Image (spheres, rainbow, N blue to C red):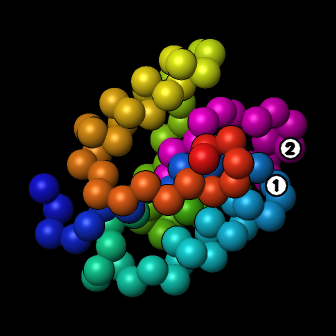
Amino acid sequence: MSARPVVAHVLNSIGLGGVPEVAWQLLRRLPDDRFDQRVYALRRAEGEEEARAARVARIEARGVPVAFADATGSLGVVAHLCDWLVANGVDLVHTHSYRPN
């Protein structure tokens, strides 16, 4: 178990709009010495792959791992998310926008 609380930021996708940007602003402002952060995306969005990859790279360069759902269908994605939360020892789940909620 991490000495710092593990915080999972759950997003619908690593999109190009405001929600991933808000998550990024929070990720970069939470103190590294107090929180161990993770990002989980419910789906891989399509289009603008280079821009999306740049957003993922920016997050990972901050030392925050990014994971994507490895399942299909709503129930499959929820089950995968639950398994991922347990495997990562997540203490706090912060959902961003209505689908992850």
Say which residue label 1 marks: 16
Horizontal arrangement in the rendering, residue 66 relative to residue 7 (left or right): right
Q: Report x, y in % for residue 92.
A: 36, 59
Secondary element at image label 2: loop
Query: Residue visible at 50% across and 28% down?
Result: 78
Structural distance between the alpha carbons of marks 2 and 1? 8 Å
Residue density around tag 2, few if under 14, some if 14–19, many if 20 or more, within 10 Å:
few
Q: Report x, y in % for residue 74.
A: 61, 21
From what the image shows, is residue 13 above or below residue 8?
Answer: above
Q: Which portion, as a residue range, is magenta?
A: 39-53
Q: Is residue 86 magenta?
A: no
Say which residue label 2 marks: 48
Q: Is residue 43 magenta?
A: yes
From what the image shows, is residue 80 above or below residue 96?
Answer: above
2 and 1 marks in contact (CB < 8 Å)? yes
Q: Report x, y in % for residue 82.
A: 38, 33
Query: Residue visible at 62% across and 16% down?
Result: 73
Residue density around tag 1, few if under 14, some if 14–19, many if 20 or more, within 10 Å:
some
Q: Amino acid at mark 2?
A: Glu
Query: Residue visible at 86% across and 44% down?
Result: 48
Q: Please identify the quarter of the rendering in which residue 20 is found.
A: bottom right
Q: Nearer the viewer's eye, disc 2 or disc 1?
A: 1
